[in-house]
Amino acid sequence: MDLAQELLAAVTGLAEEEELVRAAAVSGSLTDPAAIKDRFSDCDAVFFVRDLEEARRRDYPSRLAPQFGGMLIMQKPDEMDGGASPWFTYLMQFDRGRIDLRLLPVERAAWYYGTEPGLTAVVDKDGLLDGLTPVGREVFTLNRPDRTAYENCCNEFWWTTLYVAKGLARRQLDYAVWHLEHCVRPELIKMLGYDRGYPDYTVSLGVGNKYLPALLSPEERRRWPELYALGSPTDCARALRLAMEWFLRISCSAGEKLGIFTPDYGPAVAARCEAILAEMGV
């Protein structure tokens, strides 16, 4: 039995033993055929319970931890945000393996099935989940942009490149890096999706863009890490140049495929940024 199967067996066994737990289901990498299965894979599970507060008092983490070498660290995000969520979640990193366990009142089962991609029942004592269909993984697939979305992506990308250049000119590396990471690169990734997802947009970037490399050419994959090497002004300038070079090419390609005119200010903004970088000698 591999680790993923052990984690699943532990969750399933606990759900079957606990009278308060009326149904249990799993999602995430356990139900995603495209997910990488290795020692870092976790088990995303939900218990639908009769009494949420009583279920919390049962301390399920302490019953799971010994099976996997003990608890390394645990987080309870719903306590950290003030307890406003309709559920309670334990994020448990054991010495060997990880389980994310969410407790949810049975009354919320139908609602949750409509929000969690790939949810698959493993225990159902009362037929609580009969007839419920989980939302598909299309929530992670790319969306075909309309003209407004495409033009907004172009505008945000080019507008924020100037912030990166300004930060470098002022020797404010943190400022420049922040705008590259939070504005410039995300818009480049969005445009890549617009271009490479055409025409049916059924491909998925996955959580955290983990499937993005599949959309890149071999040369793009080779150079992609340069967009993340931001430890010095020279590195940041190199990343900005690469992002601008790619965006000019990819936005034109996407625009042609979609039949949308590409805004003409991109080359002028790129030239302005390049002039600023040249003045700085980076």
Image (cartoon, grey):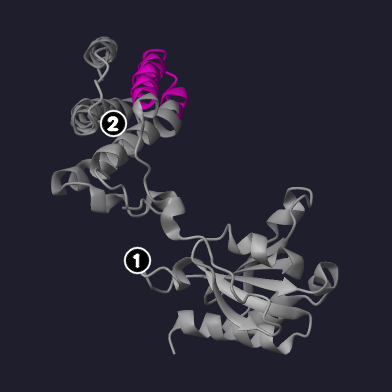
Label the magenta part by its dominant secondary structure: helix
| Magenta-colored stretch includes residue 167 | yes
Which residue type does callout 2 highlight?
Answer: Ala
Percent of width and height locating residue 241 = 24, 25
Confirm whether residue 13 shows in the render: yes
Q: Is residue 113 left or right of residue 150?
A: right
Q: Is residue 42 left or right of residue 146?
A: right
Which residue is more in the foreground, 53 or 90? Answer: 53
Percent of width and height locating residue 181 = 41, 34
**Residue at point 68% right, 76% down?**
128
Q: Residue furthest front?
A: 131
Task: Say if 146 sits above or below 272 in the image.
Answer: below
Q: Is residue 112 left or right of residue 139?
A: right
Q: For residue 243, which numbered disc appears in the image?
A: none
Q: Is residue 139 left or right of residue 233?
A: right
Return the residue at label 2: 239
| Magenta-colored stretch includes residue 64 | no
**Residue at point 80% right, 77% down?**
58
Q: For residue 34, which numbered disc appears in the image?
A: 1
Question: Start and end of the magenta stretch?
Answer: 150-178
Give residue 36's quadrant in the image: bottom left
Check disc 1 and report its element: helix, strand or loop: loop
The answer to whether marks 2 and 1 mark residues whose Cβ atoms lie closer than 8 Å is no
Confirm whether residue 229 shows in the render: no
Within 10 angstroms of label 1, few (less than 14), some, or many (20 or more) residues? few
Which residue type does callout 1 highlight?
Answer: Ala
